[in-house]
Image (cartoon, rainbow, N blue to C red):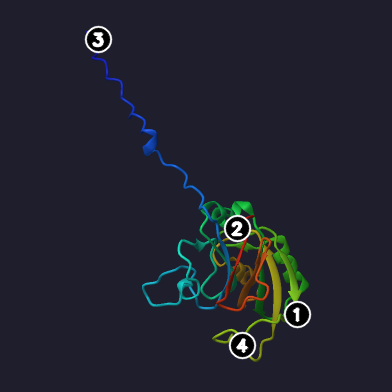
């Protein structure tokens, strides 16, 4: 007696077109905001612990950060209401260069600069090569609260250009070559520059890449 045949599994019926997930349409009026994020401000619009957020500086509904900037870092942050533009700016696969001015503890050597240029080994793998050079002290606004210095240890400034977006990457890179970061200011993302924006101030620019 032949074994009973198994019923053929039925595939779920396809969803009606109206129920399928559709890409969100771009906004009728795309907006792009350049903000100089102050020190000790979270890169989000709300916080349950009463800490300073973007809402304290930008009162524009429907915009979101394109990328992040650590609470203890300062400088250029881009915000937009266009999801596609946000992804193009924030996704590391597009490799938009990001330029940072970094005050570090110690005096940088050519060997340390070359390490940064070659790529640094971090606990989550090696970084891509960076552009790195020493800077004269830039004319920046005073930080509040001020940076804590050790009188017995000199400091210097570097300019680093990276094309990745790992968590606290610049700080980890300088620490890996023996130069702990004291102050970190992002001054450029792609073609967008901080220029003369004061901390907490913003300006709107055309929303295009």
Please identify, in this view, whether the residue under mark 2 or under mark 3 is nearer the observer: 2
User: Which residue is the site of mark 1?
Assistant: 136
What's the distance in space between the residues labelled 2 and 3, CA to CA?
Answer: 69 Å
Q: Are marks 2 and 4 in contact (CB under 8 Å)?
A: no
Task: Say few, some or many: other residues with alpha carbon within 10 Å of mark 1 (under 14 / 14 to 19 / 20 or more).
Answer: few
Residue 141 horizontal/vertical position (percent): 63, 83
Residue 77 horizontal/vertical position (percent): 57, 67
**Lower sequence index among marks 1 and 4:** 1
Secondary structure beneath label 2: loop
What's the distance in space between the residues labelled 2 and 1, CA to CA?
Answer: 33 Å
Residue 120 horizontal/vertical position (percent): 66, 63
Secondary structure beneath label 1: loop
What is the residue that sits farthest to the bottom in this orientation?
A: 151
Quadrant in the rendering for residue 188: bottom right
Task: Say few, some or many: other residues with alpha carbon within 10 Å of mark 2 (under 14 / 14 to 19 / 20 or more).
Answer: some
* 106 and 197: which is toward the camera: 197
User: Which residue is the site of mark 4?
Assistant: 149
Task: Say few, some or many: other residues with alpha carbon within 10 Å of mark 4 (under 14 / 14 to 19 / 20 or more).
Answer: few
Q: Residue at x 55, y 85 (%)?
A: 144
Number of numbered discs on residues: 4
Q: Quadrant of the N terminus?
A: top left
User: Which residue is the site of mark 2?
Assistant: 207
> Looking at the rendered structure, which numbered label has been put on residue 2?
3
**Lower sequence index among marks 2 and 3:** 3
Secondary structure beneath label 4: loop
Residue 14 horizontal/vertical position (percent): 36, 30
In the displayed structure image, the side of residue 196 where residue 65 appears, left or right: left
């Amino acid at each position: 007696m032949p074994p009973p045949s198994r019923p053929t599994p039925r595939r779920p019926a396809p969803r009606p077109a109206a129920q399928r997930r559709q890409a969100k349409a771009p906004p009728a009026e795309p907006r792009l905001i350049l903000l100089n994020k102050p020190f000790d401000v979270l890169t989000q619009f709300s916080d349950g612990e009463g800490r300073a957020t973007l809402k304290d500086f930008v009162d524009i509904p429907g915009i979101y950060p394109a990328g992040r900037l650590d609470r203890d870092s300062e400088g250029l942050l881009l915000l937009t209401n266009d999801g596609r533009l946000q992804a193009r700016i924030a996704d590391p696969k597009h490799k938009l260069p990001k330029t940072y001015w970094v005050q570090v503890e110690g005096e940088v050597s050519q060997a340390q600069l070359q390490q940064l240029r070659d790529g640094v080994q971090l606990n989550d793998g090696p970084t891509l090569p960076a552009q790195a050079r020493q800077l004269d002290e830039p004319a920046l606004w005073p930080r509040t609260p001020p940076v804590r210095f050790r009188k017995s240890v000199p400091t210097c400034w570097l300019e680093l250009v990276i094309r990745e977006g790992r968590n606290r990457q610049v700080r980890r890179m300088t620490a890996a070559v023996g130069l702990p970061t004291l102050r970190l200011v992002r001054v450029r993302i792609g073609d967008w520059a901080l220029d003369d924006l004061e901390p907490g101030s913003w300006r709107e620019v055309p929303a295009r890449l």
